[in-house]
Amino acid sequence: MSTLSFLLCADRSAARRVRRHVATLRPGLGLVVGSWPELLEHVRSSYLLDVPEESWSSALQTAASQMDGAFWARSLSLAETETLDILDRELRRLVHAVGPEGVLQDIETQALSVRGQRHYAELAELHAAMGYSLPPELVVIGDVLKADPDTALRPVRVYTPSEGCLLDPWQQALVDELNRRATSLADDALQALFDAALQRPSCTDQTASLSVLQNHLYQKTDRVSALDASLQWMAVRDYLQEAEVAAGMIQQLRDSDSDTELSEIGLLLPSNQIYAQAIHDVFGRSGLPLSGLSRHESVRDLGHEFVFYLLKVLKRPAPTMSLAALLCSPLLSWGREAGLVLSQAVMDGNFRLEKMAWPPNSAPFLSAVVKGADTTEAALHVLAEAEKLLDPESPYPAAIDRAREGLATATTELKKQRTPIWDELLTRVTPQSQTRTIEGPRTREGITVFAEAEEPWRSVRQLFVLGFNAGHYPRNVGGSAVFSAADLEMLRSKSALAIETPGERAELNRQLFVRQLECATEKIHFLLSRRQADGTALAPAASLTFMAQLFGADEPEDLICELETDTGRNRAAGLSLAQSEPPVLPRVCQVSDLNLGSDLLARHKKKDGTLYPMSPSRLETLMVSPLAWVLGRSGLEPREWAPE
């Protein structure tokens, strides 16, 4: 049985780079390039393992709520969702660090502070109370480690970069076991090809400022270099102007240098989605194609919205807007048109939906909704009827699943209560903020887009670094809400726990930023904002201080060209500046009375021919704006939505 060779990369961007290199130089079967999630899926399929059930979250919630004296007990009663998120993150960190052979309760923690010892002991007790449950990604690893090697459809040999691959104990154990079970020896030529694919051709001119930056950033050096045209830093008003300046400079570059292909120009975007949206909009209007742009789009939580409004309506008195929103939900089977008719009837005051046709099969649900539910049995009946009306052919299948999940949650909680506790039920199904990832095409022709948190996936001649502000390049390292930085250091050094410390993560982020800078071979343009969208002042990235030391700047700010000033614009190279035009006077508006060519009063008479009585305000409207008076008398004014 032939062995599958898997080249394990740090992330999907690095895998994209290696995949193209390998496909060009060594195409063939039995060779896969990917990141850790892809390896895990390949191995799971090879050993015919089922997708693990999600039992971790429910076990965590149950066990955490039963430990009354734990350090999180009070927070759990005040903010359950947020507290469970923190416990989930910290316990996952510890379970990943202890490895498949370790148990949290066996780790020596006397080197920790008193607070750290208590927190660790109670987290270890929490894991024991969960029955030593594992997160889904670790369940797969555990099943593979325990599986019979003969049950694999195809053995897998994993290749990692020679310069090092960051794997936690669970991941390392799986890689070692897969390589032990592989039936073929390691291919040295394939390993060399893998390492070569990860090399980045940085600036070849060792005297250029770009080369100095790539080779000496974050390093101690007494060398001070002169700054040349291969680097420049520009400050603008906000993130949107950054995108506009970058687009203009790229257009200017294309006009002045036709040999530069769009694929040889790169954009490095920070981990802030407003930049991805701005680049998408500005470059789309500018006719500049992008390759590799990934952005997130906010989507409504239609599923939990449906259940939330249903419970709000069942709790009396029912808010009119909640009832209207429930009836026009796009998840209901009676369709958009019927839903809008019912909703408009409610907004017109027909709260019981009387003297109107109801959609087919909706009578049990609608009659129960307009009456409300005072008892648990009545509420359970309405929830059951609501589930029957969910549209199985809805264009929002994910929202339908989430609505069913919310109905099941509300049903489970209701069965525990003698009378409905509405506030508690509403908390369980409160709509959550959701996002949808939109992956742009990855063509060979478009402008290359890199992400701050990922490896560069191809080399470019010129790189534009956007969002060069504090908190980015490198990214800030978030602290632990449970352990201090000193306690994490002690867990790493004294307790033999392979846990990542803030200092290690900060150094890894710096190394990643250097590798991103190394993908440029000619020039790098750094763009930073002076203000956030709300006007809050922003500072440059902390890396600017290290860069200033390399080029002998007295102050880091001396490197920056302020594009809001004439001096800064004259210093910056490659800007696309609009030609000045003489001012144009605004047109002179001719004010005259509007003549509709009709006797407006004569068109609004009673059946007996007499005029309707006119209030002073109506007469004033007629004199000021006859058109507005006509619209008002005809009932054509826009309806105003206001709280009750």
Image: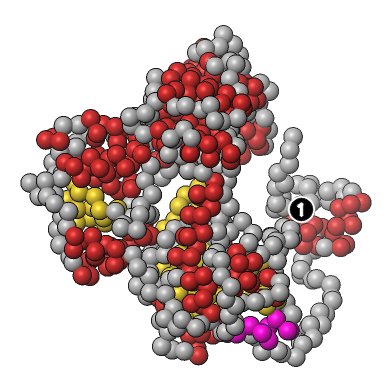
Residue 531 visible in rendering: yes
Q: Position of residue 280 (x, y in %)?
A: 51, 65
Query: Could you tell whether 616 is left or right of 611 in the image?
Result: right
Residue at (45, 74) in percent of width and height:
520
Provide the residue designation for mark 1: 632
Residue 567 vs residue 402, the one in the foreground = 567
Query: Could you tell whether 342 is left or right of 638 in the image?
Result: left
Q: Residue reaching furthest left?
A: 1
Residue at (49, 83) in percent of width and height:
207
Query: Could you tell whether 153 is left or right of 625 in the image?
Result: left
Give the quarter of the figure containing the C terminus: top right
Query: Could you tell whether 412 is left or right of 580 in the image?
Result: left
Residue 266 vs residue 161, the one in the foreground = 161
Residue 435 vs residue 8, the one in the foreground = 8
Residue at (60, 23) in percent of width and height:
71
- Assign the magenta stretch its main secondary structure: helix
On whether residue 51 falls in the magenta region, the answer is no
Q: Position of residue 195 (x, y in %)?
A: 29, 63
Read off the magenta span: 566-574
> Is label 1 in a helix, a strand or a loop?
helix
Compared to residue 25, the image places residue 319 above or below, namely above
Q: Position of residue 631 (x, y in %)?
A: 74, 56
Residue 365 visible in rendering: no
Residue at (58, 40) in percent of width and height:
485
On whether residue 567 falls in the magenta region, the answer is yes
Q: Amino acid at mark 1?
A: Gly
